[in-house]
Image (spheres, rainbow, N blue to C red):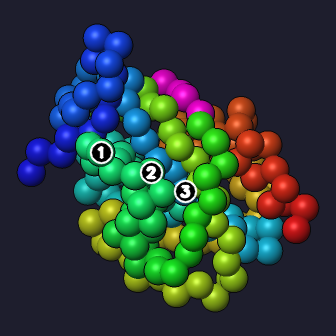
Amino acid sequence: MTIMIPAWIDGKLQPFEKLAAHQQGVRHMAVSVFVMAQGKVLIQQRALGKYHTPGLWANTCCTHPIWNEDMTVCAVRRLDDELGIKGLSPVHRGEVEYRADVGGGLIEHEVVQVFLAETTLDLALDLNPDEVMNTRWVDYHELIAEVQREPEKFTPWLSIYLAKHSDLIFGDALAS
């Protein structure tokens, strides 16, 4: 199935095939969600069948909106698609842009709408094995330390988010 995502072609946002965007390093839209509970972040280990960064740990979930999809709707959809999470209302935290080599000749050049959702540690999950092989709650500060100690176990974008955009993403959520 061909998935068309919003990408900038000749300076204009247009539908573009998702895999081709990664193969060509085309700047495109994305959504990332972080779910938190009591100072802990829910992270996921990507399924081994993923076409890039299989088996690496990432933020709660991330995706590309389909052409003309509302970003908040996309965030809610992906929480359910990947993790079976229902009933959360992610809050938009801002926009970040990054470019990263994700292996296999693929480049992520993403303009990301970042969302944060707060919940409890007993949140019900129903993992989609095509997307996620494992999850865990990790203290925010320990997550930063783990990524610094063993960056090869984490996706490039999670490293970028934590190193460059933590205040935007987590900010006041860490104080509560």
17 sits left or right of 153 in the view: left
Q: Amino acid at mark 1?
A: Asn
Q: Label 2: state its secondary structure.
A: helix
How far from the left and from the top, in percent, is residue 3?
A: 18, 45
Query: Mark 3 or mark 2, which has the lower sequence index?
Result: 3
Tell me how far mark 3 sits from mark 1, CA to CA: 19 Å
How far from the left and from the top, in percent, is residue 152?
A: 55, 41
Secondary structure mostly seen in magenta is: strand
| Residue denoted by label 2 | 71
| Residue denoted by label 1 | 68
Residue 55, visible in the rendered structure:
no
**Cβ–Cβ under 8 Å for marks 3 and 1:** no
Q: Nearer the viewer, residue 34 or 50?
A: 34
**Cβ–Cβ under 8 Å for marks 2 and 1:** no
| Residue denoted by label 3 | 33
Query: Mark 3 or mark 1, which has the lower sequence index?
Result: 3
165 sits left or right of 10 in the view: right
Q: Amino acid at mark 2?
A: Met
Checking the image for residue 146, the label placed there is none
Query: Where, by quadrant of the figure, is residue 160 drawn?
Result: top right
Single out the residue that lies furthest toward the top: 10
Reply yes or no: does residue 157 show up in magenta.
Answer: no
- Magenta segment: 96-100
Residue at x-position 33% and y-position 63%: 131
